[in-house]
Image (cartoon, rainbow, N blue to C red):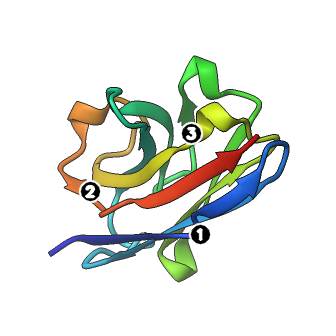
Amino acid sequence: EVQLVESGGGLVQAGGSLRLSCAASGITFDEDDYIIGWFRQAPGKEREAISCISSYDRDTDYADSMKGRFTISIDNAKNTVYLQMNSLKPEATAVYYCAADQGTIPIVIPGMYNYWGQGTQVTVSS
């Protein structure tokens, strides 16, 4: 069974940075081809795509609105995907989720992922 656990969320001031982690179990990045993505959902809003990465070749995809402010990376040895978030703004306040599904071509569309973590809260104060 694939399980994803996010961590690294918290309260940060505007302009600050956070690095989120997504630890996967039930799969092995070095042996299984998976796409792991990051998404967020603010209260009263739809889930929004951020980025995704392939465990096969580390190829990435970013939502256009997220380019330049977020960086996704993967550590196959640790079975963990990271999301570095810089220059955070209050509108980035949301629950951040990681998701995964089998594949080699990174496409950051929420409906393409079958496995989801529980999320981690990020709050950016002004």
Residue at (78% x, 54% y) in the render? 17
Frontmost residue, 120 versus 73:
120
Neighbours of disc 2 within 10 Å: few (<14), some (14-19), many (20+)? many
Q: Which residue is mark 3?
A: 60
Q: Which residue is mark 1?
A: 8
Looking at the image, tell me whether mark 2 or mark 1 is earlier in sequence order.
Answer: 1
Residue 116 shows which numbered tag?
2
Task: Give residue 65's position: percent from left, percent from top.
Answer: 61, 20
**Mark whose residue sits in front, 3 or 1:** 1
Does the rendering let one see residue 108? no
Are dots 2 and 1 in contact, CB under 8 Å?
Answer: no
Task: Give residue 71's position: percent from left, percent from top.
Answer: 69, 45
Question: From mark 2 to mark 3, how far is it between C-alphas?
Answer: 19 Å
Which part of the image, by quadrant, shows the C terminus? top right
Looking at the image, tell me whether mark 2 or mark 3 is earlier in sequence order.
Answer: 3
Question: From mark 3 to mark 1, how far is it between C-alphas?
Answer: 21 Å
Q: Is residue 50 left or right of residue 31?
A: right
Task: Give residue 82's position: percent from left, percent from top.
Answer: 60, 61
Residue at (54% x, 51% y) in the render? 57
Q: Secondary structure at mark 1?
A: loop
Q: Is residue 9 left or right of residue 70?
A: left
Which part of the image, by quadrant, shows the N terminus? bottom left
Task: Give residue 23's position: percent from left, percent from top.
Answer: 44, 74
